[in-house]
Image (cartoon, rainbow, N blue to C red):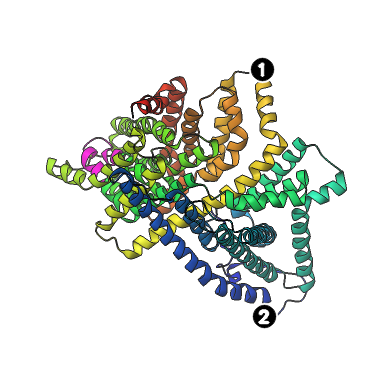
């Protein structure tokens, strides 16, 4: 779910409303729209070409990682300073693309309420949020520029590459400045929308003053609360600002911005403006410049290259050739294809959209029941975040400081069990009622073999990435570089793949990475604030003090993730909740690797569970031309939700199923 385009959307798209008082002529100049348009014409090419440069840097990072790995393994001579260089390239990639990511609607926001609000109310809210965002990132830009000047004056350079840190901080300052200017331009777009609704100048003046007053009150909420109510204790401050964050999240402020704004203003209350801004000054760069974060763009690039190379269709074809003659065979083949695609793509919404566009027309051709056809795709798409390499596991590992390699291994067996369970759910339904999923024509052995040979490069890539991590031969970061470069090689020889698709994959991977890194900046500020409030400790102590079994608390936490999974993207959801809930989970004695797998399954269940479920909306969009209703899709996913519940119960009773592969890595380590 993404926020409305703050700049590209024209104010003319808003609905004119009747107003009291004299109406200004239709041809009267809308100065706000003129300013927004001029700002967009200036900012768009700058942000776009910087993002293009960032996309090229992403590709160079993956190639550089492979060159270093070959040099190390074959010639026993690793490239000097590669860790520093990869980290610095990551900074360029993230901050060169962050503003264009905003222009292209890629910063995640919750639209559960805003989609139901009027244009007028949304324009009012987004005007306030644009001011807050411009203030937030404008401050980060100013602070980063000051840090750059200090670094140049002190002649601070990296140990090996001798890269001037002042240059890196200047890149951060430029990226956040462009993001602030983009948000400032968005302000005029939203004010234009308000102006069109309130052509009575006096009424518009009142609304404009309300926007400014609320925005200023939010930015200086710390001083305002102290003046009106005196000092609160840290826990109370934590609760107040947490409620503020949840409110502005639900009202459409992007997730990353909500966390960063809440963290900064909360710190201003607890430790004062000077110290709070100093924390922001350090956090803006340090939240991104971590070598192990390089794995994020690598696995994203791997997934988007496979997506644009048309591998999903090949995997689906292999699935239906092997399982088509079974009752419900096309749906079983869809689930199998989703599992295979998930192993490379690692993103649920992309898996559902890709496999849905390929499989639903085929199942309609053979008169499959609409609920079974759409339900199998929606459920199969959820495998994208569970079967490694999964970007969700990468983010979970980063936040909880767990091994990425172990998280990947932990997802393999549960993923296989879930694929098998989904296939059995289809088979049982079609055995009971054969009309739900008629058998497809029998494929010959030659056809099956040909379909399998069409996907062998993907199978080798998956085996190389996961096998390298499991054996200890590759770190997750190195495996990500191999995966991205291998996906590039596979895509390059795929029919129909061209430089336009290559650049599209690079841009999508770069923009998604920028979205994640912006959230990480917000997580850094929010995490520092939450730590000072002692909320995680207080929450953990409260739960421990309850006279109930730890499994009661465990179930309550899972239900929370189920509900959140209905309305939020999985990555910001983890970043938002784990700083508070993870200490509680560990304190209750649950294994963090095991819990990560359980949590991911619950959140994915939320993405197909009524009354919302983001994957259901994706499949509804794909199946719209067949007049498939939302109710039909929801009916189709019920058996798959039951399977997911049973798998959760199984993994809870027998956690060894999840932990066997990760634990075996510890056994292999001494043998290296």
Mark number for residue 547?
A: 1
> Of residues 89 and 52, which is closer to you in this image?
89
Q: Compared with residue 549, is residue 37 higher up or lower down, i.e. above or below?
A: below
State which quadrant residue 219 falls in: bottom right
Which residue is rendered at x = 75% and y = 48% of the image?
A: 268
Q: CA distance from mark 1 to mark 2?
A: 66 Å
> Of residues 96 and 448, which is closer to you in this image?
96
Work out whether residue 181 can be spotted: yes
Which residue is rendered at x = 60% and y = 24% of the image?
A: 587
In this rendering, the label closer to the viewer, 1 or 2: 1
User: What residue is disc 2 on?
Assistant: 29
Q: Which residues are magenta?
A: 317-333
Q: Residues at badges 1 and 2 in contact (C-beta under 8 Å)?
A: no
Mark 2, secondary structure of its residue: loop
Q: Residues within 10 Å of mark 2 (few under 14, many from 20)?
A: few
Which residue is rendered at x = 42% and y = 32% of the image?
A: 406
- Type of secondary structure dominating the magenta stretch: helix
Magenta span includes 318: yes
Tag 2 or tag 1, which sits nearer the N-term? 2
Magenta span includes 284: no
């Amino acid at each position: 779910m993404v926020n409305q385009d703050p700049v590209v959307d024209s104010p003319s798209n808003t609905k004119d409303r009747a107003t009291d008082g004299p109406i200004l002529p239709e041809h009267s100049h809308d100065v706000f729209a003129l300013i927004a348009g001029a700002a967009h014409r200036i900012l768009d090419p700058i942000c776009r070409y910087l993002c293009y440069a960032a996309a090229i840097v992403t590709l160079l990072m993956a190639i550089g990682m492979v060159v270093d790995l070959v040099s190390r393994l074959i010639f026993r001579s690793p490239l000097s300073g590669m860790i520093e260089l990869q980290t610095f390239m990551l900074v360029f990639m993230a901050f060169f693309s962050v503003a264009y990511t905003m222009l292209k609607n890629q910063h995640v926001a919750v639209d559960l309420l805003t989609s139901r609000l009027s244009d007028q109310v949304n324009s009012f809210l987004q005007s306030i949020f644009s001011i807050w965002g411009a203030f937030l990132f404008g401050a980060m830009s100013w602070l980063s520029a000051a840090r750059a000047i200090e670094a140049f004056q002190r002649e601070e350079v990296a140990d090996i590459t001798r890269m001037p840190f002042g240059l890196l901080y200047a890149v951060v300052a430029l990226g956040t400045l462009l993001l602030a200017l983009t948000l400032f331009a968005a302000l005029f777009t939203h004010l234009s929308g308000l102006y069109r609704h309130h052509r009575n100048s006096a009424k518009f003046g009142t609304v404009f003053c309300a926007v400014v007053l609320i925005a200023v009150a939010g930015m200086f909420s710390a001083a305002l609360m102290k003046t009106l109510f005196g000092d609160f204790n840290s826990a109370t401050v934590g609760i107040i600002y947490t409620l503020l964050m949840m409110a502005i999240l639900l009202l459409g402020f992007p997730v990353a911005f909500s966390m960063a704004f809440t963290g900064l203003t909360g710190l201003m209350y607890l430790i004062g403006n000077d110290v709070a801004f100093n924390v922001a000054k350090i956090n803006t760069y340090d939240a991104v410049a971590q070598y192990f974060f390089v794995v994020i763009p690598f696995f994203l690039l791997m997934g988007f290259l496979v997506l644009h190379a048309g591998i999903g269709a090949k995997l689906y074809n292999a699935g239906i050739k092997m399982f088509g003659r079974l009752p419900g065979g096309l749906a079983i083949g869809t689930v199998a294809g989703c599992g295979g695609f998930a192993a490379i793509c690692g993103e649920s919404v992309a898996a559902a959209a890709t496999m849905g566009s390929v499989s639903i027309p085929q199942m309609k051709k053979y008169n499959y029941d609409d609920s079974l056809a759409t339900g199998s795709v929606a459920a199969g798409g959820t495998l994208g975040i569970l079967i490694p390499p999964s970007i969700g596991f990468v983010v979970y590992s980063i936040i909880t400081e767990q091994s990425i390699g172990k998280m990947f291994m932990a997802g393999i067996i549960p993923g296989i069990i879930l694929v098998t369970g989904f296939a059995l759910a289809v088979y049982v339904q079609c055995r009971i009622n054969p009309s739900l999923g008629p058998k497809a024509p029998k494929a010959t052995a030659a056809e099956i073999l040909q379909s399998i040979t069409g996907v062998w490069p993907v199978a080798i890539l998956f085996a190389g990435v996961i096998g390298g991590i499991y054996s200890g031969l590759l770190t997750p970061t190195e495996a990500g570089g191999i995966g991205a470069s291998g996906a590039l090689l596979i895509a390059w020889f795929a029919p129909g793949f061209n430089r336009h698709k290559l650049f599209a994959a690079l841009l999508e991977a770069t923009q998604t990475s920028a979205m994640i890194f912006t959230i990480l900046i917000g997580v850094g500020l929010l995490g520092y604030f939450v730590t000072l409030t002692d909320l995680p400790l207080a929450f953990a102590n409260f739960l421990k003090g309850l006279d109930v079994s730890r499994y009661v608390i465990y179930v309550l936490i899972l239900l929370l993730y189920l509900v959140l999974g209905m309305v939020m993207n999985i990555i910001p959801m983890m970043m938002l909740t784990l700083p508070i809930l993870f200490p509680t989970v560990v304190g209750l004695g649950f294994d963090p690797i095991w819990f990560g797998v359980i949590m991911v399954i619950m959140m994915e269940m939320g993405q197909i569970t009524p009354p919302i479920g983001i994957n259901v909306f994706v499949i509804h969009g794909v199946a719209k031309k067949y007049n498939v209703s939302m109710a039909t899709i929801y009916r189709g996913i019920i058996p798959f939700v039951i399977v997911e519940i049973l798998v959760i119960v199984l993994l809870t009773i027998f956690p060894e199923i999840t932990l066997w592969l990760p634990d075996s890595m510890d056994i292999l380590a001494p043998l290296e």
